[in-house]
Amino acid sequence: MRKLADTCRRKGKTIGLVPTMGALHDGHLSLIRKSAKQNDFTIVSIFVNPTQFGPDEDFGKYPKAFKSDCDEAQTAGADMIFHPSVDGIYPDGFQTFVDPGPIADKLEGAARPGHLRGVATVCVKLFSICKPHRAYFGQKDAQQLAMIKSVTRDLNLDLKIVGCPIVRTKTGIAMSSRHSYLAESGLKKAVTIYDSLKHAKRLVKAGETDIAAIRAEMTGLIKTATGAKVEYISFNSWASLDEVNLISGKVLISLVVIINTVRLLDNIIIHSKH
Ligand code: PAF
């Protein structure tokens, strides 16, 4: 992989990297298309990264679809699939991790200790191996995107991180590989998650700045429509992820809802003039 990346660079070709864990959906494909537009050579990595899963999480059963992933990635514009083994990325004696700092302790970091440290570590390794000029991440995992930008800046990594908009199903559900865990009834319930975010946006547009009031309305809407458990609804300044008490400036509203034991994430960034 490194030799190929070196050859590309020697020939003056730009490299785009789309890191994935496979089970590709339209969200991933939109990243690949964007990379293919902006670069001469697009690498899609497919690697289910063990260090970002907790001991009781779904590492062992994470959805896999390697053959169709390759076909779909190629159709979307990928020039190469990088599919390393776990031993290749974490050989015996591996002991170095990237600590992203406090940005990784809140939100998903609080719910899944060590998760973002694992993501940061594998991404820095993928950057080092694939040598991209640009790497593409979806805003669906907004904290991951903010954290990777922060790590790239803090470690002076020589690439640009490109954030891309969330891709949704026709009914508004943010695309996720973990949807395969949900039955039809679960997917129907999941529609309410984006409804609650749109409702929050409307409230802000109408002048509401009180976070407790917005959170209460969102929770009420989800509970009434689905009975699902809201794990958290958080309001953070974008992109520092500092928690905010009032809506002002660029604010990330993110939430996790548990439907049929599946944790579903979604978010929206609102621009308030207050
Ligand atoms: O978003 C993902 O799929 C993963 O966290 C990533 C960025 C591929 C790292 O394993």
Image (cartoon, rainbow, N blue to C red):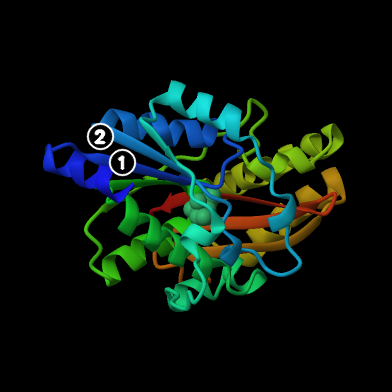
- Is 137 rendered above or below residue 236? above
Q: Give me the residue at 42% from left, 59% from top.
A: 123
- Across and down, in percent, residue 188 comes to 80, 34
SS assignment at label 2: loop
- Across and down, in percent, residue 100 comes to 43, 73
- Disc 1, disc 2: CB below 8 Å? yes
Query: Could you say which disc has been placed on residue 231 in the image?
Result: none
Front residue of 221 and 139: 139
Q: From the image, which quarter does the C terminus lie in?
A: bottom left
Q: Give me the residue at 48% from left, 31% from top.
A: 29
Q: Give me the residue at 37% from left, 62% from top.
A: 124
- Between the C-alphas of marks 1 and 2, the distance is 6 Å
Q: Disc 1 marks which residue?
A: 16
Q: Residue furthest front?
A: 92
Front residue of 158 and 61: 61
Is the C-beta of the residue carrying label 2 under 8 Å from the nearest atom of ligand 1? no
Residue 207 seen in render: no
Q: Give me the residue at 52% from left, 72% from top.
A: 92
Residue type at mark 1 is Gly
Residue type at mark 2 is Asn
Q: Quadrant of residue 145?
A: bottom left
Front residue of 173 and 133: 133
Query: Could you say which disc has been placed on residue 39 in the image?
Result: 2
Q: Is residue 50 left or right of residue 4?
A: right
Category of crowding for the residue at label 2, using alpha-carbon neighbours closer than 10 angstroms: few (below 14), some (14–19), many (at least 20):
some
SS assignment at label 1: strand
Front residue of 49 and 274: 49
Residue 101 seen in render: yes
Lower position in the chain sequence, tag 1 or tag 2: 1
- Across and down, in percent, residue 158 comes to 21, 58
Category of crowding for the residue at label 1, using alpha-carbon neighbours closer than 10 angstroms: few (below 14), some (14–19), many (at least 20):
many
